[in-house]
Image (cartoon, helix red, strand yellow):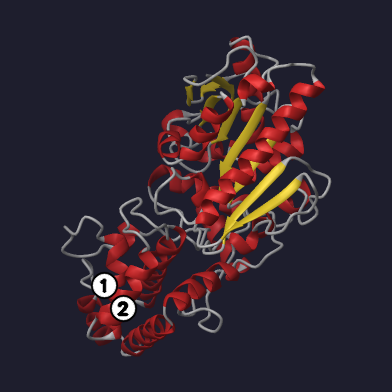
Amino acid sequence: MDQTIDHFNFVAHGNQTFKQRYLYNDTWWYKNGGPIFFYAGNEGNIVDLWNNNGFVIKAAKTFRALILFVEHRYYGKSLPFGGDSFTGDNIGLLNIDQALSDYAFFIRRFKKTHGVEKSPVVAFGGSYGGMLVTYMRFKYPNIIQGSVAASAPIYQTAGKVSGDTFFQVITKDFQTVSPDCEGRVRSAFAQLNQWASLGTQGYAQISQAFQLCNPLKSNQDYDHFLRWIRNAFVEAAMGDFPYPSDGLPAFPVKVMCNLLQTAPTPVEGLRRATALNYNISQTLNCFDIYKEFKYCADPTGCGLGLDAIAWDYQACTEINLEGSTYGVKDMFPVLPFTAAMRDEYCYKTYKVLPRRDYMDVQYWGSDISSASNIVFSNGNLDPWAPGGVLNGISDTLVAVIIDGGAHHLDFKYENPNDPQSAIDARNFELRHIQKWLRDYYQRNNIGIMNVLK
């Protein structure tokens, strides 16, 4: 669909548009007023998001809804300036305000095109997408009747919760599996630091032990190497699902712990555990740490490719993701990412400086009590959980915790291995969706709720 390039400046680009990609499914839709379930695309390809969000399908079947997934500007194929989207000033139109306006106008146009202006819209989003659907209720409650926000760290990204907690939760996840697991990790890093202190000789020993394609040659290489290892633990903790997912085995934290504990030495255990993430295909003969992990303004990882550039830029401007490890409350080496480091990196990379108070002011900071009709879900294994809403605030701002749940487990397809807490969370969310729809239809004198459920 054609989307306005700049919603807030009438001069620079006028009414120029770009093609914004979307996917929809009307298989179960009750076309005479049935709801629209809108998924807010986040930092990735919309097709991948579509394929990983089974809960929206379950909800659509339950309430006879149309499913609508819209891709976030600057991600996937929704590039405002095509191949030049990330050059010069063009990247400057990548921000949350523009994205929210995209979604609001998209929904309005979609409803008008299909002649369903009276259909209520419920929004769904996970992680950054969960933040977006939360903000949609703040800014466009006339368009969105309610939002389900899974694993949405709205407090952390507004600078209200330290990013250090992210790595502390990962440590706790591994401690829970086995206290010895944490000890093996600490021992391995201590040995690596001892080798690194020897300089060239030590770097060669590390490079050989970890089968690196390109030997470490400097402190900078060693720092990147340590962040590369830490990122493997990040991926395992976020993806600690009770079934295989995205190339990782079921319960990858437990698998990594087993690798750590059964290896002949702590360093070899750390190599094997790290390889679980980077050698999923088991076809690599060596590891290219600069190719497999990119240093960026998000210490939890930006990913790879153009989507990684887009997310890096967002973390350099509005979204606060500063976070460090110090080996005290966490099991990782001293790897800081401070405000000063963020400033230096972002100015060097994009010629921008972060505005740390922007999210706090623009998106309500830690006081969101004036909002309504939002369900916040978090898993207690998810490193992002401390940065989100963990307790209900009012009858219409409610929260659910998924015991044994990792990053937005509730939005995944149902699986026989799901913990009961995930099943309960989905049912909790469905009950609130039902209430939002019933209230909407009653308020607008539309008597079809009995048809939907």
Q: Could one spot residue 97 in this view of the protein? A: no
Residue 323 percent location from the top left of the image: 57, 67
> Which image quadrant for residue 90?
top right
State the quadrant of the C terminus. top right
Above or below: residue 452 compared with residue 220:
above
Q: Earlier in the sequence, mark 1 or mark 2?
A: 2
Name the residue beneath numbered marker 1: 272
Front disc: 1 or 2:
2
Helix, strand or loop under label 2: helix
Q: Residue at x 36, y 64 (%)?
A: 252
Q: CA distance from mark 1 to mark 2?
A: 7 Å
Q: Residues within 10 Å of mark 1 (few under 14, many from 20)?
A: some
- The amino acid type, in three-letter code, at marker 2 is Leu
Type of amino acid under label 1 = Arg
Could you say whether the residue bearing mark 1 is in a helix, strand or loop? helix
The furthest residue to the right: 370
Residue 299 relative to residue 140: left or right: left
Residue 347 place in picture, x, y as percent: 57, 56
In terms of depth relative to the viewer, which is nearer, 357 or 388?
Answer: 388
Closer to the camera in the image, 446 or 346:
446
The spot of residue 84 in percent (x, y) is 45, 33
Dot 2 crowding, Cα within 10 Å, few <14, some 14–19, many 20+:
many
Work out whether residue 267 or residue 223 is closer to the camera in this orientation and state it.
267
Residue nearest the viewer, comparing 21 with 418: 418
Q: Is residue 282 left or right of residue 226?
A: left
Residue 175 in sight? yes
What residue would you read off at disc 2? 260
Look at the numbered discs 1 and 2 and tell me whether their residues touch, using CB distance below 8 Å: yes
Which residue corresponds to the image point at 54% horizontal and 39% vertical from the top-left? 91
